């Protein structure tokens, strides 16, 4: 994906991966079904709310969208932002070219920020 300056990540995680510094940005958006569905020709979606996570890689001042993950909440489930963020982040990180240990380091940095 091409570098972009239109949108910026809302959360930056600076970490040191084996042999290199790494900055990853995260953006979360929570949406309701009525915010994404406005065409009466199609039935409404089976989900009530959705969380989208975008993973941005930041290198030398350039910000690049690396991946996006979605987590949909069924109409029978209770919506929880924390759960939606975790699932969406997990699905986004599966698309980024990081090893299992490097993804673990991203998770640890995310948990530190969220807990503080």
Image: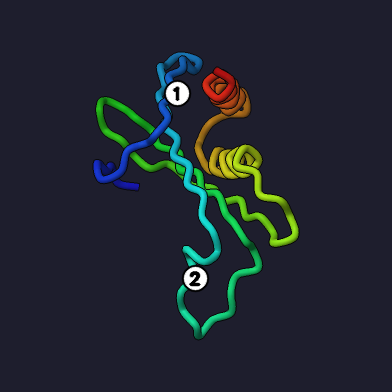
Q: Residue at x 42, y 16 (%)?
A: 20
Q: Residue at x 62, y 61 (%)?
A: 48
- Under circle 1, the secondary element is strand
Residue 107 sits above or below residue 21 on the image? below
Toward which corner of the image does residue 46 lie, by quadrant? bottom right
* Left or right of residue 49: residue 60: left
**Quarter containing the C terminus:** top right
Label annotation for residue 38: none
Q: Earlier in the sequence, mark 1 or mark 2?
A: 1
Mark 1 surroundings: few (<14), some (14-19) or many (≥20) residues within 10 A = some
Residue 101 sits above or below residue 39 on the image? above
Q: Position of residue 39 (x, y in %)?
A: 46, 79
Q: Nearer the viewer, residue 59 or 80?
A: 80
Q: CA distance from mark 1 to mark 2?
A: 33 Å
Q: Position of residue 90 (x, y in %)?
A: 61, 39
* Left or right of residue 6: residue 105: right
- Under circle 2, the secondary element is loop
Label annotation for residue 13: 1
Label annotation for residue 37: 2
Toward which corner of the image does residue 55 lie, by quadrant? top left
């Amino acid at each position: 994906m091409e570098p972009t300056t239109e949108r910026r990540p809302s959360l930056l995680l600076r970490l040191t991966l084996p042999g290199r510094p790494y900055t990853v940005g995260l953006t979360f958006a929570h949406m309701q079904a009525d915010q994404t569905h406005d065409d009466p020709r199609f039935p409404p979606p089976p989900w009530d709310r959705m969380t989208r996570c975008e993973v941005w890689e930041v290198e030398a001042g350039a910000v690049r969208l690396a991946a996006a993950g979605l987590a949909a909440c069924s109409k029978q489930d209770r919506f929880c932002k924390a759960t939606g963020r975790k699932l969406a982040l997990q699905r986004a990180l599966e698309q980024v070219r990081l090893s299992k240990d490097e993804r673990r380091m991203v998770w640890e940095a995310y948990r530190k920020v969220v807990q503080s």
